[in-house]
Image (cartoon, grey):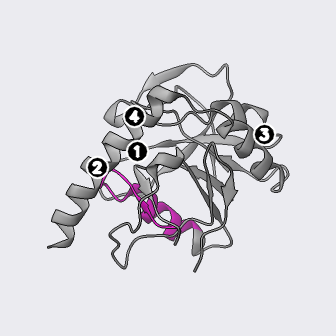
Amino acid sequence: MSMVTAKVAARKAAFAARKQAFAAGQGAACTHLSTALAGFGDAALAGYMPMRSEIDPRAAMAAHPGPVGVPVILGPGQPLIFRSWTPDAPMIEGAFGALIPETGAEITPRVLIVPLLAFDRRGYRLGYGGGFYDRTLEQLRAHGPVTAIGFAYAAQETPEVPTEPTDQPLDLIVTEVGVFAPAR
């Protein structure tokens, strides 16, 4: 099976699992995320605005004592930038329908809350296929330490995510069940 075929099949299964988990609610996920983020003090944080059935990190983002940004897609094949966000920031629709702050300074995060379709215990994630987070993490990590935290429902765990050399690993994974560091 080709990597493209494997990822397409994995995405289809992951969407179904996430949709079912979304219907059940996120439980203690944001509490676990806030606890994990507390270990990073006021480091610049990037979160995301949830779309479709993605788990919602906004309560943990709002509680973070340092600067918080959300991703802005500049175009295909480009890394993300992060625009400053607060809970009362006026939002507009960006690329792919994701909400982004209407205005705000660009921030460079040291910690990223990363959305995903599926994850495995090795710390790999399956995204939507655009490579935005992989390119962004690679670029940020080239300039210093960056922590990528996958935020998902426990039901999104899969035995093994199909990976390529360009896939960037997660450093932590947070679900409604708890927090764990991937085994490498």
Q: Residues within 10 Å of mark 1 (few under 14, many from 20)?
A: some
Label 4 belongs to which residue?
20
> In the rendered structure, which segment of residues is drawn in magenta?
123-140
**Residue pictured at 47% horizontal, 70% vertical:** 168
Mark count: 4
Q: Residues within 10 Å of mark 4 (few under 14, many from 20)?
A: some
Circle nearer the N terminus (3, 1): 3
- Three-letter code, disc 1: Ile
- Residue 22 versus residue 14 in the image, above or below: above
**Residue pictured at 46% horizontal, 22% vertical:** 92
Label 1 belongs to which residue?
73
Give me the C-alpha separation between circle 1 and circle 4: 28 Å
Q: Judging from the image, what secondary structure is the residue with disc 2 in?
A: helix
Label 3 belongs to which residue?
64
Q: Judging from the image, what secondary structure is the residue with disc 3 in?
A: loop
Q: Residues within 10 Å of mark 2 (few under 14, many from 20)?
A: some
Report which quarter residue 73 is drawn in. Answer: top left
Circle nearer the N terminus (2, 4): 2
- Three-letter code, disc 3: His
